[in-house]
Amino acid sequence: MQIEIATLFPEMCEAVLSESIIGRARKAGHISVRCWNIRDYTLDKHRRVDDVPYGGGRGMVMQADPIYRCYEAVCRDIGTKPYVIYMSPKGKVLEQQRSLELSVMPHIFVLCGHYEGVDQRILDEIVDEEVSIGDYVLTGGELPALVLVDTIARMVPGVLPENLCFEEESHFGGLLEYPQYTRPAVWHDREVPPVLLTGHHKNIAEWRSAQSLEETKNKRPDLYAYVLGGQGMQIAVRDQDIVEFMAVINRYHQEHPILIDKYLMGKEIEVDAVCDGTDILIPGIMEHIERTGVHSRSEERRVGKECRSRWSPYH
């Protein structure tokens, strides 16, 4: 895989890309990351690459021509048109799934803006996708580009020892990663969970799975999408999760239908009503205290029964 970064500050990018896992992967040839100085492609004798914005306003705007010349040089060098990404706060926020999709592309060209951004015409001419790393503004596109390269590169074969190195991390499977511990076993009177000291792989895996769900529930409840109810309640965040959970459930004969609820973020209100064919009676309206998708079906039935027993029709 080849990633080309077009920037006004190649030294800044190289300082990061030459270190740690990405640096070793580059030396080993698992991934190619090169930095191109946009100033090398300006025709201005003072190496200017920006000018004042049309219509007035503060700051300077990067000119289209030096960027395009840099882009053309990259195309000639690699012999094809790369997939072009512009790092921009106006782009779609980067997620793990998108990083995984980008990691299989053979050639990516990352454009780093600066100052007040770049001339819109170059974006219309060459850019395939605008990517943001969050809803905030930075001085330039170099730091976002480094984030993008890091999250893509670590999923390229050979960069990490094995796929499990990133498949068990936060967001890859839709959930947050379980807590990690290392020596000593006791620190400041805080002990490592005993199950991690047993060496029992099955119990450890079950503990980690439960902790992953708990971390997601407490820290990122927005990642929940579905709850598969019943005795073996599972939470699915992707369609593929439902397929996998159903495969596990159907290992045994099912006498009853499998309940699948879809939950939306926000308040969950339950209205109970009975009708005799003419009149409708609403004996109770209940708001769930727990976040949607968190409580189990047995709890919902129990809480609902208790609420209905306390409320009169006149409420």
Image (cartoon, rainbow, N blue to C red):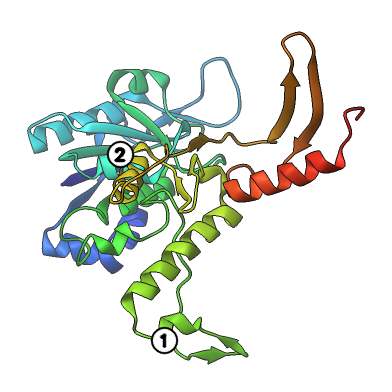
Residue flagged by tag 2: what amino acid is it?
Val
Residue at figure coordinates x 65%, y 44% from the top left? 301
Left or right, 267 with respect to 25, comes to right
The residues bearing labels 1 and 2 have C-alpha atoms spaced at a distance of 45 Å
- Using the image, determine if residue 123 lies above or below residue 207: above
Q: SS for tag 1?
A: helix
Q: Which residue is mark 2?
A: 110
- Using the image, determine if residue 87 lies above or below residue 21: above
Say which of 149 and 275 sits in front. 275
Left or right, 173 with respect to 187, comes to left
User: Is residue 115 visible in this depiction of the protein?
Assistant: no
Q: Which mark is residue 267?
A: none
Say which of 177 and 201 sits in front. 201
Left or right, 76 with respect to 178, comes to left
Q: Quadrant of the C terminus?
A: top right
- Residue 167: image quadrant is bottom left
Residue flagged by tag 1: what amino acid is it?
Leu
Q: Which residue is mark 1?
A: 197
Say which of 67 and 296 sits in front. 296
Residue at figure coordinates x 19%, y 62% from the top left? 25
User: Is residue 187 visible in this depiction of the protein?
Assistant: yes
Residue 196 % position (x, y): 42, 81
Residue at figure coordinates x 24%, y 64% from the top left? 23
Return the residue found at the far top: 278
